[in-house]
Image (cartoon, rainbow, N blue to C red):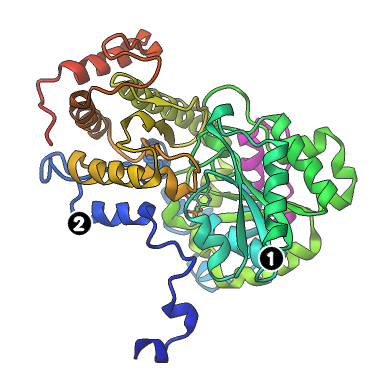
Amino acid sequence: MQKMLLSEKATSNSSHGQDSSYFLGWQEYEKNPYHDVHNPTGIIQMGLAENQLSFDIIESWIATNVDSTDFHKNGKSMFRELALFQDYHGLPAFKNVLAEFMAEIRGNKLRFEANKIVLTAGSTSANETLMFCLAEPGQAFLVPTPYYPGFDRDLKWRTGVEIVPIHCSSSDGFRLTESALEESYQQAQELKLRVKGVLITNPSNPLGTTMTKKELNYLINFSIAKRIHIVSDEIFSGTVFDSPQYTSIAELVVERKLNQMTDIWNRIHIVYSLSKDLGLPGFRVGLIYSNNEKLLSAATKMSSFGLVSSQTQFFLSKILADKKFTRNYIRTNKKRIRERKEMLVCGLLNVGIKCLDSNAGLFCWADMRHLLGENSFEGEMALWKKIVYEVGLNISPGSSCHCVEPGWFRICFANVSKEALSVSMNRIKAFVEPMGRVANGLSQGEVVCKYWRMRSLSKWVSQLSFSDREADR
Ligand SMILES: Cc1ncc(COP(=O)(O)O)c(C=O)c1O
């Protein structure tokens, strides 16, 4: 009955990805969320790449700049102006500061021009808009795996665009190779799908790594040869907390002077958002940056369906215009992300779980292959269910990110408190130790976390090991 009243799109779940374990884990968490006092045996949410580490810096800016939050500029109320503003080109002052913020994040190695920015309601909307503008339904984008599970919804669902995976392997740290690119292209041809582009996430979600210049060069050469687009989702660009240094695809294009070849420069599009670096996913601020005038014009028209409110633009244009604030924020935020990541890596190493070496992001990509009952995706799902229901941690299985090797899990660390992280490590310890399984090359008890040298961290780890708080599940 329902089906007859609603459209096929509204009633079909195909390609939305809502039934993926990535989203199911969130639902399980919602039913039984951990709280240190009210629900100490609840599920700890470690499947959400949220950045809650630096709210205090933003809050203290707000406390000293009340004018900006109550819509005043130079003592004059902006209320009426903001209430009426609806130009889909966005507030010029906001686009200017966004362009400067993007440059600042990249160490000012690159200039961004405000008139090449299209504002969107988050990167979700930016990625979908790009798909609408670059491909027809039934055409394909190649995407390296493992990838952010939301792409199945964002790139495919409403647009009808197909994703063809570029399979990357743990044998070389999930790097993008020329042969993997070619294979994926061939696969699309066998499926009779016309390839319109490659979409990368740099830094990667879920790997937490930045792409090397070598990888980016493969990609650029490949796109020149095949005459296809590159979409570079750089939503985590401000989280790079360790070497190697971050290189945006745009930097490499300028370095190789390819920006003088309008052909390829017109086919490279950057996606960015304030959801991760500033920790503001609720504000819904994203953007497309492109050199392609036709694309900018089409995307601007489409942005009517997902505008950023003028109130948000006004507030953020004030805060991002404060260069002292942005510099301090970026530096401090990275330091905090790094510390938190080291806590997680160290806590996991302590029980014989290794993570892929990472230098960015709000998560670790943990290798739990040695904990699988059987080496298959069924085995991975069985382990994931135990971790959610028995251990009480919502983490994301690699299969939800289309990883081709069972046994990898994404664990987020920037949305939980230090205390909850400590509880989660105690729970993992209580789960793993009785299994008596440790990863190759590691033996329990002998594991020495290199970060233990840091005093504060070693104190935290020893609290973890000798905590008089029993693992509570
Ligand atoms: C790679 C990637 N792209 C896009 C998004 C969507 O972000 P937004 O909140 O800006 O829509 C996410 C969110 O996790 C992400 O990880």
Q: Quadrant of residue 302?
A: bottom right
Would residue 226 be found to the left or right of residue 162 on screen? right
Seen at 41% across and 49% down, the residue is 66
- Residue 17 in view here: yes
Q: Earlier in the sequence, mark 2 or mark 1?
A: 2
Residue 162: percent from left, percent from top: 61, 62
Specify the quadrant that holds the N terminus. Answer: bottom left
Secondary-structure class at tag 1: loop
Instruction: Give the answer, above or below, for where 118 lies relative to 450.
Output: below
Q: Residue at x 56, y 35 (%)?
A: 169
Task: Tell me residue 204's x, y (percent).
Answer: 55, 39
Considering the image in quadrants, where does the C terminus appear?
top left
The kind of residue on which mark 2 rests is: Lys
Q: Residue at x 42, y 79 (%)?
A: 11
Within the magenta stretch, is there residue 115? yes
Q: Which residue is mark 2?
A: 31
Which class describes the residues within 10 Å of circle 2: few (<14), some (14-19), or many (20+)? Answer: few
Callout count: 2
Task: Tell me if 64 is positioned left or right of 151 in this view.
Answer: left
Q: Which residue is mark 1?
A: 139
Badge 1 crowding class, 10 Å Cα cut-off, few under 14, some 14 to 19, many 20 or more, is: many
Q: Check residue 253 for magenta coloring.
A: no
Give amino acid for label 1. Gln
* Residue that appears at 67% across and 38% down: 103
- Measure the alpha-carbon separation of dots 2 and 1: 39 Å
Between circles 2 and 1, the one closer to the viewer is: 1
Which percent across, then down, holds residue 225? 84, 47
The location of residue 58, given as percent across then percent down, is: 42, 41
Closest to the observer: 251 or 169? 169
In the rendered structure, which segment of residues is drawn in magenta?
99-117
